[in-house]
Amino acid sequence: MDYELLKVIWWVLIGVLLIGFAVTDGFDMGVTALLKVIGRTDSERRVMLNTVGPHWDGNQVWFITAGGAIFAAWPVVYAVAFSGFYWALLLVLFAMFFRPVGFEYRSKMENDRWRNMWDWGLTIGGAVPALVFGVAFGNLLLGVPFELDAFMRSTYTGSFWALLNPFALVAGLVSLLMLCMHGATYLQMRTAGELHDRTRKVAALLAVVVAALFALAGIWLYAGIDGYVITDSVSVGGVMTPLDKTVAVQEGAWLANYSKYPLMMLAPLVAFAGLALTLLMSLANRGALAFVASSLAVTGIILTAGFSLFPFVMPSSLNPSHSLTAWDVVSSHKTLGIMFWVAMIFVPLVLSYTAWGYYKMRGRLTTDFIENNKYSTY
Amino acid sequence: MISENLVDLSRLQFAITAFYHFLFVPLTLGLSFILAIMESAFVMTGKQVYQDMVKFWGKLFGINFALGVTTGLTMEFQFGTNWAYYSHYVGDIFGAPLAIEGLMAFFLESTFIGLFFFGWDRLTRVQHLMVTWLVAIGSNMSALWILIANGWMQNPVGAEFNYQTMRMEMTSFSELIFNPVAQVKFVHTVSAGYVTGAMFVLAISAYYMLKKRDLPFARRSFAIAASFGFASIMSVILLGDESGYEIGDVQKTKLAAIEAEWDTHEPPAAFTLIGLPNEETMETDYAIKIPAVLGLIATRSTTEEVTGIKDLLVEHEERVRRGIEAYALLERMRGGDKADDVVAAFDALKDDLGYGLLLKKYTNNVVDATEEQIKQAARDTIPKVAPMFWTFRIMVGLGFAMFILIGLSFWYSIHHNVEQKRWLLKALIIFLPAPWISCEMGWFVAEFGRQPWSIGEVLPTHLAVSTRSVEDLYMSLAGFIGLYTLLLIAEMYLMIRFARLGPSSLHTGRYHFEQQASAGAAATQPAQAVKDPA
């Protein structure tokens, strides 16, 4: 396979892993973020936790694998983004610490303070990463203040607080509320009774709010945010580093892809259609279909962000020509090729045994079930 | 130039988070197989006690596993946050095993661990048994890929420097996988994990035996752990990874430091059992030596030499000088002079580029290094001998102590009289921390002994760090230590509580505290232990 094609394939594969993460781990993060919002009693909260109990750990591996894949296929991005967004990433990590222990330890003691403490931990573990990922994406669209020296060492000159600008916060809210909606549709499918009714209302409400915020972010991007373009003719199929091109900042450049490749318009359309269907299916009490619709919405929203940036991955506001793009952050031709085949073999395998796991654990959980199995469930 | 403080703090943070992670990993590696063996016994015999064993030890497994997952997250992302230049410089080859670990092993382990805990009523017996085995296989494959990555840091085969991209790039995937250092390390490390799992089950079962409760449960657990543990400790010792220390220059240097082998001796070299290594005089004071043993262990022969530190120093100084030339050529090429003869000259010297980069600690230009700086850079290539010498001996000493304890446990267990050997049961409890101490000492030897390199002979540690401020590091370090301490307290609290409670925590009505409770209820005595923990 030629190098240029592999570069595009790896952009797609990393997109697949990130979407896989948002669609799977996203719903369990949504569930725990809503733990104290929807769950009124201890038994209800336990029902919520146990709907994701057998799955959250496997879901979380999408996040870990996305990290590993970026390391292997886009080492420059792994280096520059993770060290630049140091505090944002540590915040995500610190918040995520509370997930495995929260799930596993919470119900091991019959003590209200103990359980309440871990419930807060789980809430943070779901909400904070969801928010920060959106904020990070918002900042990618705005450009990030970093540059590289001749030996490819990167320096980031921004601060953590600068990440929390208005546009990025809107992006963060889109991400947080989108995953909460996603979690609510999952709960809709897996719970019964009063709790179930509440999840339907929350999912329907959030679908409307997310649609409004997503539209707001789109208008903001169109009207107020400059994009980046590569201005010299680089041969994208060759060996390149981020130092080998010239980039300019241009008004409206983030929307240029949609006129260049009209098919990309499908991404925002799928996002809005997914949100509308989430609303309708929740109102119609069709939990499984609401979850499918919500998964489509999540996919569409992430793809919209990715398509707007393409081929950029992390534009540099400090020195635009040092921006990271899908053409110049990649590993060698050989590594991309090997890792492509690894992904082709293992991603389908993972999907099939994950599906088997979900199939085996299907069905609605009730508070009665929790009370009858209180020593063997979360 | 990069501040020494930043480098030291970044190293400290990595060391603390890695040591902490490895408090949980070995138990996962070992206990997962013990669970699979117990469940196999259940499926084959149909005896309820074996299923109770899987569920109870599975509970403790879960308490430990949660922190293993938590701390593992840090390991995956810390290369990027704190070792950004490292990530850029070697991501092309080092990232591959990490990504494969996720896809091939971690998904397997994590997907099936959920079914292990929640699938008892949803799966057939055979399906559940399969799930348990897949958890064990997944966690051990995870270790394989991580150790392939780590083995490559010690002995970086199958990669070459590319001056255009300023990084190491993969030349051979199979050399990466079949790196002999990685293979030896894998067997040694997972076996040490199995010993940890076995010691854990032995010590806690010994506690029940000393308390004379739940004896059939404790006896069966003890017997399985003793036989599994005995096979594992034999593997740790016989396949001890000292055999890997003759492969590659960094490993040779490490061996010389571990053994305080200052001079190269006539083969086969003597083994210094104990003594006081003296860095000043480059001698080991009061050394007690056993003839020929080191040569046999390290080279598996009586004729090959074990290279001493003094000779390594001479070799390394030569390489620093060649490294300076390589660096000068690299700068010319980066500046745009890509004439064939420049590239050819660089290619001839590029294996020594890493040694040239060692000088970056002293002078940013490298080429203007003074004689004294060159000598200092060469001296930097030898890790401090005393810490290596002692940590290695603590690891090996505890290893032999466990060999004796597990051996005796196995012997008395097959002769059905282990309950009478109360001294042995007590010793097992006292030695419960031994496998963890040994494992951590082993990692200290492997990683401290790799210094000054982050990638052996390729990338010095002080160049590998991210460009962050010292304040960032103080704050993140405080965050890690604070959170990890809180989590460890919660973990130890639950672990001790459930270990004390034993299989009664399953609430089946078949075990000690519940029977005591029903007897106690008749005698109107409150039974404290059953009341609070779930």
Image (cartoon, helix red, strand yellow):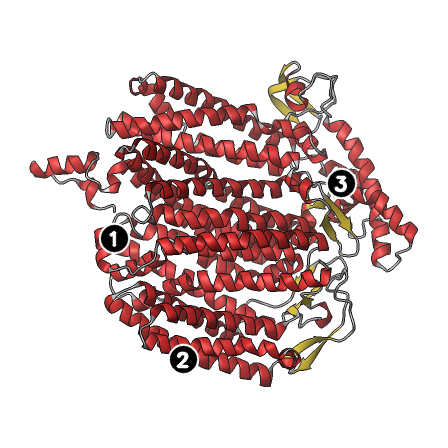
Chain for numbered disc 1: A
Q: Quadrant of the N terminus of chain B?
A: bottom right
Q: Residue at x 57, y 64 (%)?
A: A15
Q: Amino acid at mark 2?
A: Val
Q: Which residue is mark 3?
A: B377
Please tell me whether residue B419 is drawn above or below residue A265 in the rendered image: above
Please tell me whether residue A72 is drawn above or below residue B62 in the rendered image: below
3 or 2: mark nearer the eye: 2
Q: Which residue is mark 1?
A: A111
1 or 2: mark nearer the eye: 2
Please tell me whether residue B61 is drawn above or below residue A115 in the rendered image: above
Q: Which mark is residue A208?
A: 2
Disc 1 to disc 2, C-alpha distance: 38 Å
- State which tag comes first along the sequence, 1 or 2: 1
**Residue A339 percent coordinates (x, y):** 63, 53
**In this orientation, does residue B1 appear?**
no
